[in-house]
Image (cartoon, helix red, strand yellow):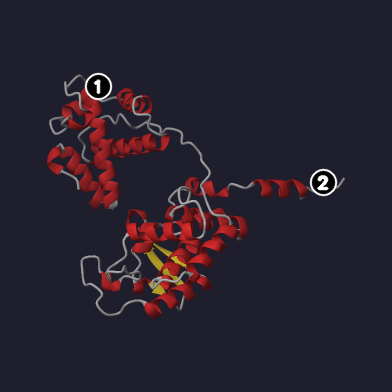
Amino acid sequence: MINREENPDYINSFLDYSATILNKSPNTIKEYNYDLQMFLRFIKIHFNMTKEVDFSKIPTKDITIETIKKIQLDDIHAFLSYMAIELRSKSATRARKASSIRVFFNYLSQKANLLKINPAQNLESPKLDRRLPKYLNLEESKKLLDVTANEDNRNCQRDYAIITLFLNCGMRLSELVGINIQNVDFSESKMTVIGKGNKERTIYLNKACIKAIKDYLEVRPKQGVKMDKLNSHKALFLSERRERISKRTVQYIVDKELRAAGLDTSKYSAHKLRHTAATLMYQYGNVDIRALQELLGHESISTTEIYTHVNNQQVRDAIEKNPLADL
């Protein structure tokens, strides 16, 4: 929860604008608040405005807009340097902070008209470390599905449907728990999910997904399902308590099935199954990167490009297929 009483008015106005006009998700709003609180605390230290030694206890409510007007690009760079050197923050963390600061100053200068000069106008994002995503190979994916399908437990159909959707559709964890029965269109073999930024997108379902969902619906509890604020009675996937399944429960299910399949749970997770689906579709399905971007719900094509990596065998095959190879 955000404690708005600890914020200056201009921060709360920015959060309201982000939620109502930019339609940012509650999680993004919390991230904005956290990032800006951290930035303003640093500014008080940087401008010699506090003697508090405990960074987390530095108040920010007393930072006026006049102080904000004094901030220059060098001060923002100093904050990012502090994160890199003192906090040893990863480049992805610093990039998120830079993005929050950029959006914030854009609001103050372009929307709220509180600043004449935007100090973050030319702020660049830290270069991200490009790491190849961890994913299951084809044989490991088949083994995971086989183990889940044949496990002797009363939630077998539900758990199998969950693993099947992750591995075939590449959906996010939040998207999966948010699926309602009415979102599934069997006649068109598709479903709608709510992705990042509350954006609705369509996911097409193959035969394996359709069968898994139908098999689960045959045993899904129909009596005693809770009528609550989570709209559990509409949810596709239910927990043992007959309410909408939680992210934590799904993560537990994935972890349990990975262990049953003899796979390393320190390397793989629900999110890694999303990586797996994207990688397998790209490697085996000859999927265009733009189609993959649409399927995964990425705003930027650069995010999708991490799945275009190739393994050593593909590199070897490429060399062997060179028309000059046999000369």
Q: Secondary structure at mark 1?
A: helix
Q: Which residue type does callout 1 highlight?
A: His
Task: Pinpoint residue 289: horizontal percent, then vertical percent.
Answer: 55, 53
In this view of the protein, which residue sits in the foreground, 306 or 246?
246
Task: Pinpoint residue 323: horizontal percent, then vertical percent.
Answer: 80, 49
Q: From the viewer's perspective, is 240 left or right of 134?
A: left
Disc assigned to residue 325:
2
Q: At 30% from the left edge and 69% from the top edge, which residue is drawn?
A: 240
Q: From the viewer's perspective, is 155 left or right of 278?
A: left
Q: Does any portion of residue 205 appear in the rendered image?
A: no
Q: Residues within 10 Å of mark 1 (few under 14, many from 20)?
A: few
Q: From the viewer's perspective, is 2 left or right of 312?
A: left
Mark 2 or mark 1: name the one nearer the start of the chain: 1
Q: Which residue is mark 1?
A: 46
Question: Residue 194, relative to residue 53: is it above or below?
Answer: below
In this view of the protein, which residue sits in the foreground, 154 or 178?
154
Disc assigned to residue 245:
none
Task: Pinpoint residue 29: horizontal percent, then vertical percent.
Answer: 26, 47
Q: Please identify the quarter of the rendering in which residue 285 is found.
A: bottom right
Q: Are marks 2 and 1 in contact (CB under 8 Å)?
A: no
Q: Does any portion of residue 244 appear in the rendered image?
A: yes
Q: Secondary structure at mark 2?
A: loop
Question: Residue 222, relative to residue 102: is it above or below?
Answer: below
Q: Residues within 10 Å of mark 2 (few under 14, many from 20)?
A: few
Q: At 44% from the left edge and 53% from the top edge, which residue is drawn?
A: 269
Q: At 18% from the left edge and 42% from the top edge, which residue is drawn?
A: 12
Task: Pinpoint residue 154: horizontal percent, then vertical percent.
Answer: 39, 73
In three-dimensional space, the C-alpha distance between marks 2 and 1, rounded to whole angstroms, equals 62 Å
Q: Which residue type does callout 2 highlight?
A: Ala
Question: Residue 153, relative to residue 267: is it above or below?
Answer: below
**Furthest-top residue in this view:** 48
